[in-house]
Amino acid sequence: MPCRVGRCAGWQGILRGKKTRPGEWLAERGIFLVSLSAILIVFLIFLFVAREALPVALGRMNSAAVAELIPVEDMETVPPAKLRRYLGLKEKDFAAMSAETKRELMRVKLEEFEHAPKDPDAALNTIRWRHLLLPHQWSGYDKPEFIWQPVSQIHKYNIVPLVIGSLKATVVALLFAVPLALGAAIYVSQLASPGLKEYLKPGIEMLAGIPDARLSGTDPITGFWQNIDQVRALGFDDRFIRLWHYYLCYCEAGFLERQTGVAQMLLARPDCQRAPLLWRPA
């Protein structure tokens, strides 16, 4: 039976046993499938990140800690589209929800408003492009500043400090890495004897498996004890200090022994990421 060259070349090699051995052909196909799957996974990761970031890029999300309050008694007079956005619900969830459940959600919104921070910046949508790229006069600051504080009471997401900090760390690392790498490469390739080169080359390649080492003294344990007076000034006792020292030592040992890693996860209910936690679908 005639066959195409691209499809049958591998099998012909297996049958003839001349140019392609069965083990080599299977290994090549396996490596190809693994590489293809890796490329596909990376593409899907970028696609997922782009899908999650699209509402931010289009200005459809609001990170303000304080939003416009709609009284519960005005629920019947508010347009459904505005009420749905106020409650942070999907269209299908909003349509299937009873009026009493909507009132309960509005009461939850009222409680959130009463416990919201009183900071003037609490009403700002800090994920707008002007707050992401330009300085802003935040409350408590004397002048407009670029601030990256995603875990503060008022979330600040200006990406300028994030980019500058990454570039600083990269430049400092390159100042150390480039001269050492070039010197090692020149010595191994041009100056080292064949016998010494036989041991140096694999030894240098094995350095990639050594965990990263920090040369500065700003690790968490050192920073914790350097600011111990401030910790005590906040009212924390010796038991709390010993507990946190033990925790930081445990984390350091886990990272050094490669028994602990870092992962960032966002847990949310399907189709209801911004709904209050007290609400549960019927």
Image (tube, rainbow, N blue to C red):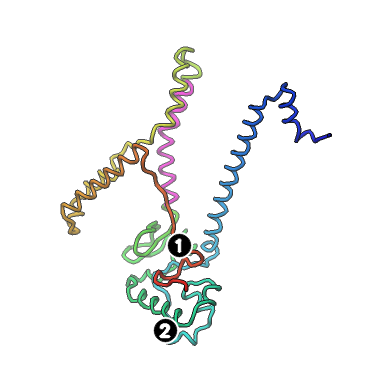
Q: Which stretch did the figure color magenta?
A: 162-186
Q: Quadrant of the N terminus?
A: top right
Identify the disc placed on residue 18.
Answer: none
- Left or right: where does residue 282 sit relative to residue 34? left
* Nearer the observer, 69 or 262: 262
- From the image, tell me which residue sits under label 1: 268
User: Percent from the top left, x then y, of residue 3?
Assistant: 81, 35
Dot 2 amino acid type: Val
Mark 2 or mark 1, which is nearer to you? 1
Image position of 125 with respect to 106: above or below: above
Write down the quadrant of residue 145 in the picture: bottom left
Q: Is residue 178 a member of the stretch shown in magenta? A: yes
**Disc 2 secondary structure class:** helix
Dot 1 amino acid type: Ala
Q: Which residue is most to the left?
A: 238
- Left or right: where does residue 2 sit relative to residue 275? right
Q: Is residue 143 a member of the stretch shown in magenta? A: no
Q: Residues within 10 Å of mark 1 (few under 14, many from 20)?
A: few
Write down the quadrant of residue 235 in the picture: bottom left
Identify the disc placed on residue 72.
Answer: 2
- Left or right: where does residue 228 sit relative to residue 265? left
Residue at x 58% of width, y 48% of height: 43
Write down the quadrant of residue 169 in the picture: top left
Label located before the other in sequence (2 or 1): 2
* Nearer the observer, 79 or 161: 79
